Image: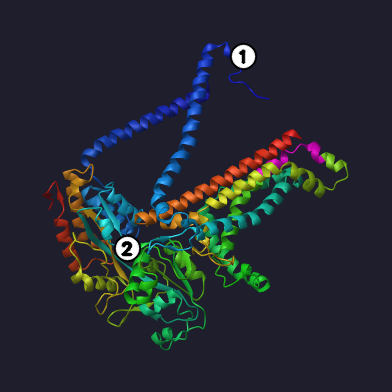
Amino acid sequence: MKLRFPPPFLSSRGVRLTGDLVFQAVLAGVAVLSVIGLAVLLLRELVYGSLPAISEFGLGFLTSTEWNPVRGEFGALPFIYGTVVSSLLALAIGVPLSLGIAVYLAEMASPRVRAVLSPVIELLAAIPSVIIGLWGIFVLAPFVREHLAEPLMSYLGFLPLFEGPAYGYSVLTASLVLAIMIIPIISSISREAILAVPRLQLEGALALGATRFEAITGVVLPYARGAIFGAVMLGLGRAIGETMAVTMVIGNSPQLFTSLLHPGYTMAAVIANEFTEATGELYLAALIEIGLVLFAISMVVNVLARAITWRYMRVQGGA
Amino acid sequence: MRWWTGIAIAMLLLLAGCTANTEQKQGGEVQKEITINGAGASFPYPLIAKWSSEYGKLKGVKINYQSIGSGGGIRQTMAKTVDFGASDAPLKEEERSKMPGILHIPETLGAVVVVYNLPGVEEKLRLSGEVIADIYLGRITRWNDPRIAELNPGVELPDEEIVVVHRSDGSGTTFVFSDYLSAVSEDWEKEVGRGKSLSWPLGLGGKGNEGVSGLVKQNPYSIGYVELAYAVQNRLSYALIKNRAGRFVEPSIESVSAAAAGAASSLPRGDESWEGVSIVNAPGEDAYPISSFSYLLVYRELSVIPGMTEAKAKALVDFLWWAVHDGQKYAPELHYAPLPEEVVRLNEETIKLITYQGKPLL
């Protein structure tokens, strides 16, 4: 059902109507100017700033692996690769955990447990990323080096994925840190989505003789998949853009790694690392162009997330 | 009226009162107090902050320095949005040509020390530039390599792989380190070169001095490099480096000052190009070879900066004069090396060049 604005019963009172119109106009102006205007200005600034690099390297910028500020050769591939791999790995670790948490809190936990656990998990999202990064340096990286890398190398070392040597500062460590950072977002939105599934759906499945596991995996999760997918995409967006915590543990080495135990580099990290001391037009432009690529990738992820969420929601609406 | 409307109005009034107050205050102080704005390298920040507070007490002039990095400092100086800039590396000709009349004033000295984590080795390690370059090029990969052993007779070196650590963020520290390696190793100069960010042949990158020292502390058999002040304050073990005279020198405030004194005779004038000026591998018995100047960048004709007044220009020149003389006594307590006499003389000549609308200020 659509509401008309202003609702008809207010129209007779002229004073109220003018006020509402002004109010509406102001809010619309703010929304358009701040959101769309900012995005356009940002994009313009990024494109404008990266023009020297675009005209110098063209599309080769995206495929070159050479990053040598001394010689003025710049290629973004190791950073794009590092960002994509570390973010996807973070999803692979974080999504199953988040879904487990969401299902447990929504369907299984007693109200008292839920009341304690939910805010604690959401609190994780409030920890500044530099603090998580410090924890990564002092706790997680040594743990990965001493306890995680050893068994991975000895049992799965035949895979190039787990080749040594392991220093602790690696793509794997960065992905673990990222997973921790995206779990609160994904799990809390998924929990809300699961809670929003009509009880009749679950009860119907149980009445038909489904076990709790079958009812949840066969009925509840598919029903909520649109919103859950949106949550995962939000998490991915956060992982792609995360800077400080990643740069503190990833080892900052621009290479096309095959082993997850080796150091890598991400787009956000190289901008944070090198921008303040970058001199020379081309160097700056190359860093800004990396920002532009990051902006484009984040946009694509978000638009995809929206599109898929909408599609699922419409399917549900029609069903 | 609802209760919250009352509160909102009260808050607004309070806010309005506050802003009116500060405006009055500022309006009154603008007449008396001069604020000088600077921006640039983070390396000299603790020293300049100390100067700012001491000079503020002394003369009532406020020095506002933002440590945004050398790159940012050069950009802001070029855009003339600050009264002075600061950079860890001298300007390249390309940059200098965009800032006609810019002066270099070396205001303090820094050094880079090589730190390591060698469990079981008690003695201080001795290294030479060539060996360090080859470690960072990946040609010396084990601690018991004969070339390291040769420099360290009597030291039992472990048969372990060397874990190489470097800075990941662009920094003056990396510039000095790579400048030194380029000076002593042709291969390094050809393959890697000098710069604030490098294309490293191998190794792990840590962010900042704290990132590098964290990596070195956590990884046994690792080697890295940090600023002298950082290593001293955190009691890291660092290597003695072989200098040009063939002696193994411990990094210290004295040995860094000695390096500057050794190089002083070959320095350009403040208004000349400083590109390529470097005091790494300086001559002198006691000179520590991985040393460098940090520079203040000031326009020779100060009226080119928008908003500059004669009083402000005079205050800036007085501050610079004070910084290279009396200001130097605050350096050692912050682990910076004070400028040697020869460099102070050179700076005096440079500061005397500064004018406002063609009028000398000293």
Q: Which residue is mark 1?
A: A9
Q: Secondary structure at mark 2?
A: helix
> Tag 1: residue type?
Phe
Q: Is residue A234 above or below residue A144?
A: above
Q: Nearer the viewer, residue B260 or A113?
A: B260
Q: Which residue is mark 2?
A: B334
In this figure, what is the number of numbered marks?
2
Q: Residue at x 44, y 29 (%)?
A: B11
Tell me where residue A101 appears, x and y as whole percent.
70, 50
Residue B154's disc is: none
Chain to which the residue tagged by mark 2 belongs:
B
Asked if marks 2 and 1 fall on the same chain, the answer is no
Which amino acid is tagged 2?
Leu
Task: Decide: is A207 above or below A91.
Answer: above
Magenta segment includes A250 = no
* Image position of B162 with respect to B27: above or below: below
Question: Which residues are drawn in magenta?
Answer: A189-202
